Image (tube, rainbow, N blue to C red):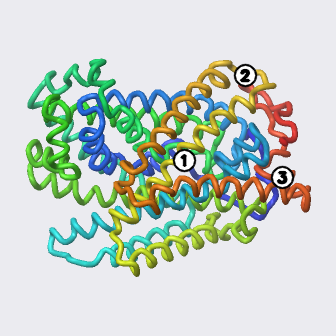
Amino acid sequence: MTGTPPPEGNARFQRTLTTPKIVFIIIAAAAPLAAMVFTVPLSFALGTGPGVPAMFLFAGLTLLCFSAGYAAIARRISHMGGFYTHIAHGLGRRAAAGAGLLAVLAYNAATVGVLGAFAYFTQSVAAAQGLDLPWQAWAGAGLLLVALLGYREADLSARLLSICMVCEIAVLIALDLAILARHGSTALPAASFAPHDVLAPGIGVSVMFGFASFLGFESAALYGEEAKAPQRSVPRATVIAVLVVASFYALTSWLAVGALGPKQVRAQAASHLGDLFFLLSDHYLGHPATVTMQILLCTSLFASWLALHNAANRYMYALGRDGLLPRSLHTTRTGHGSVHRASVIQTAFTTVVVILFAAAGLDPYVNMSTSMLGLGTLGIIVLQAVASVAVIGYFRHRRAGRWQTVVAPALGALGLTTAAILVVSNFDVLTGTTAPAVTALPWLLLIVAGLGVALALRLRSARPDRYARLGAASAPAPHPAPAGGPSSGSLSQAAP
């Protein structure tokens, strides 16, 4: 196997993850059904209306550019550090420390946000079927199951996530086929790609929701030390996930425009919002299929919750290994090779947040989900943009294809920076509130990133040996082996 060796520590992982399993994990984090049910109607109503499908293609193309550079660096670096490790090699240890703490905050916030949505909609769906329990009960049940699965190896989660993902995509494909069967080619109106609709007022909101719908797709690199062949499976899984998600989002939203009518889609979405796709399902598939879709919405949110929980764990594990977080987080469970202690801490953090929101009498969706998902989404988009720049920095003095290591990452960084600016400027739209306590949350990302830089500077003066190991930036990474030959050569010098 090629790639950087794992840093020192007591980690022993079972390399059981294949490309399909990683694809299932990262697409599950994006929660395709939840994205269609929640973000598409909002994008129709507040954004460009019939031009929304083009915004999904724009987001997909931007993220493909990001993925080209991401894949290039992932072929050479396969640590369980994701953006943190890549940024260490491309931009230096101080930037990596800031990005690492930012990632911990972003993924933990996103995890809590998805939990809130899961508890809220599971309560609503179950109550409609005669099982009326408070949202706190569903949150507790979900926490218990996520804690159990997070305590085990990633392969078990991958199997469950694959089932959830296949089911939620299957019901949307059934809806797509039903719309096509009834309307034929008119179900794919040209208006969705007409310049005056694509560039209509509200384009910033549609771009923002387009990128937000891909949340978590970039987490493949976090499983580098658990993959059977990380230099192949991680890059492939990332590219496959972007292609699948972008194509699926664009096609399904396009067919929804065709079913509602390009001239009526904005008004219909504004009237029905979260019920829009359920109404389409009732009309084209029948009520039993709608009930199935509602249940699968809950499993979709749970799958996203579990995938984000696992991503947050692995960032905490990697930063614990390097001393930016308590080193006790850098332990794996004997027999399962899971990052069990980080999983327990993440579960405890989530539990405390849920208790605080519940004790304050706040709504799990309107208050907890929207604010935490808004914070997490912005943080992850910022990390993607910085990681794109890190790819350019990493390959600056190395021979590699110019498209993958300069042009594509630069285009990705430009698109992602634009998306981050749009999210900040429309943060009240994304979170659904103008409350100062929520609209000020983006400042928290800057504060945490600054804290990471300060910790790195302290380590540089107090513990230079530990500073040198941040992000495994001091570990030499061999070139990928040519076909049939051994790997050779050193890829990195010590990062600043």
Q: Position of residue 224 (x, y in %)?
A: 64, 47
**Which residue is rendered at x = 33% and y = 36% of the image?**
249
Amino acid type at circle 3 is Arg
Q: Position of residue 25 (x, y in %)?
A: 48, 50
**Which residue is rendered at x = 16% and y = 53% of the image?**
290
Q: Earlier in the sequence, mark 2 or mark 3?
A: 2
Q: Which residue position holds label 1? A: 380
Q: In the rendering, which numbered label is found on residue 469?
A: 3
Q: Quadrant of residue 60?
A: top left
Q: In the rendering, which numbered label is found on residue 448?
A: none
Which quadrant holds the N terminus? top right
Give the spatial CA distance, label 1 vs label 2.
27 Å
- At label 2, counting other C-alpha atoms closer than 10 Å, the crowd grade (few under 14, some 14-19, many 20 or more) is few
Q: Is residue 158 visible?
A: no
Q: Position of residue 404 (x, y in %)?
A: 63, 24
Q: Is residue 351 visible?
A: yes
Is label 2 or label 3 in front? Answer: 3
The secondary element bearing badge 2 is classed as: loop
Q: Earlier in the sequence, mark 1 or mark 3?
A: 1
Q: Residue furthest front?
A: 436
Q: Position of residue 82 (x, y in %)?
A: 64, 47
Query: In terms of depth relative to the viewer, which is nearer, 67 or 285?
Result: 67
Q: Is residue 44 above or below residue 97?
A: above
Give the spatial CA distance, label 1 vs label 3.
24 Å
- Relative placement, left or right, of 444 versus 430 is right
Q: Is residue 477 above or below residue 464?
A: above
